[in-house]
């Protein structure tokens, strides 16, 4: 769901392209489901379908891991889970801090899925003195005055920003100065970071706007199909042209 990009070259240090890295979590999710059902091996076609990826792309991706499968048998599920987890750095514990413990920050803190994937919520930080000392998801919220000490004490390298957008850059700057080198940003703002810091942005409203665009297009196609050959649906034409950007050929999907 992350829609952002990382501030890194397209190829990682060990020669794995960024696009392959982005697909590894999809394979891992599908493989984990197979592992939970005690399925021992899987063909590239089955795994590609489960991960929603083209099977030729999957084979190419796995070749970067040095995993080629066995003809007629497929890939060993457990070994691939291990290989991908190792490649993604998930075989080690990653302490994470969440900054901004409002609706979203508290919901993320309460989400059990992070810990099972190797991400431990080490601290919750908020600027509101009323929030400091409160328990959220069994963790005591700490005041943002303590941010630098908390990051250093817990060896945190990943920070999650769920503050209002107006303060997100300032929070990001403090996180980076304190030693955080990866940021997951939920605030609808573009963050500037120095080289060596990765930022991923999650924005559900942009995802919804893209879906709205596709819904509108499908509705237009249905209306066109319902008309006799050659006729143009006037209302749809008007709506589409009104929603196009300045170039005329791109939808005006505005950032949140
Ligand atoms: N990415 C998405 O899909 C998505 C979805 C929902 C909300 N959001 C965004 O997430 C953010 C949080 O939304 P919310 O509904 O939880 O808001 P909220 O107002 O409930 O919570 C924000 C929290 O941040 C704290 N805060 C403010 N300034 C701070 C600072 N300088 N340092 C530390 N904490 C600070 C506030 O005290 C508050 O507890 C907003 O930017 C919102 O736009 C994103």
Image (cartoon, rainbow, N blue to C red):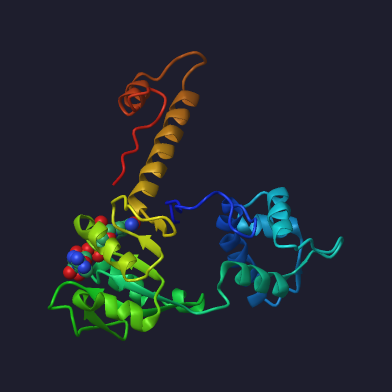
- Is 70 drawn above or below residue 241 in the view shown? below
Name the spot of residue 91 as percent of width and height, x first. Answer: 58, 77
Left or right of 31 on screen, residue 133: left
Name the spot of residue 250 as percent of width and height, x first. Answer: 40, 29
Left or right of 44 on screen, residue 172: left
Determine the quadrant in which ligand 1 lies: bottom left
Q: Name the residue nearer the viewer: 187 or 228.
A: 187
For the image, the number of numbered tags is 0
Instruction: Specify the quadrant that holds the N terminus.
Output: bottom left
Please give the name of the residue rendered at 54% of the width and 78% of the height, measured from the top-left corner: 92
Q: Residue furthest top?
A: 230
Please give the name of the residue rendered at 58% of the width and 56% of the height, measured from the top-left corner: 12
Left or right of 20 on screen, residue 130: left
- Is 210 drawn above or below residue 19 in the view shown? above
Left or right of 256 on screen, residue 61: right
Q: Image quadrant of residue 73?
A: bottom right
Name the spot of residue 8 as percent of width and height, x first. Answer: 49, 53
Q: Image quadrant of residue 32?
A: bottom right
Please give the name of the residue rendered at 35% of the width and 55% of the height, measured from the top-left corner: 193
Please give the name of the residue rendered at 47% of the width and 29% of the height, measured from the top-left corner: 221
Q: Name the residue nearer the viewer: 105 or 171.
A: 171
Q: Image quadrant of residue 111?
A: bottom left
Q: Name the residue nearer the viewer: 62 or 231.
A: 62
- Is 112 drawn above or below residue 197 in the view shown? below
Q: Residue furthest right?
A: 72
Name the spot of residue 160 as percent of width and height, x first. Answer: 35, 67
């Amino acid at each position: 769901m992350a829609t952002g990009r990382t501030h890194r070259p397209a190829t990682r240090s060990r020669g794995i392209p960024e696009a392959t890295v982005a697909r590894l979590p999809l394979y891992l999710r599908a493989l984990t489901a197979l592992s939970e059902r005690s399925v021992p091996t899987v063909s590239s076609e089955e795994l590609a379908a489960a991960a929603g990826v083209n099977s030729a792309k999957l084979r190419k991706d796995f070749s970067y891991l040095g995993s080629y499968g066995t003809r007629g048998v497929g890939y060993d599920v457990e070994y691939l889970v291990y290989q991908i987890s190792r490649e993604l750095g998930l075989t080690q514990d990653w302490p994470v801090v969440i900054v901004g413990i409002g609706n979203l920050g508290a919901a993320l803190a309460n989400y059990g899925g992070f810990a099972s994937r190797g991400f431990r919520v080490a601290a919750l930080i908020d600027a509101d003195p009323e929030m400091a000392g409160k328990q959220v998801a069994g963790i005591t919220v700490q005041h943002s005055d303590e941010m630098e000490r908390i990051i250093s004490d817990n060896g945190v390298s990943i920070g999650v920003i769920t503050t209002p957008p107006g303060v997100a850059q300032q929070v990001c700057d403090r996180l980076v100065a304190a030693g955080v080198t990866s940021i997951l940003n939920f605030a609808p703002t573009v963050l500037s970071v120095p080289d060596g810091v990765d930022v991923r942005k999650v924005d559900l409203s942009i995802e919804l706007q893209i879906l709205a665009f596709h819904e509108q297009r499908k509705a237009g196609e249905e209306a066109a199909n319902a008309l006799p050959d050659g006729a143009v649906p006037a209302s749809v034409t008007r709506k589409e042209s009104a929603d196009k950007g300045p170039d005329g050929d791109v939808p005006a999907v505005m950032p949140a």
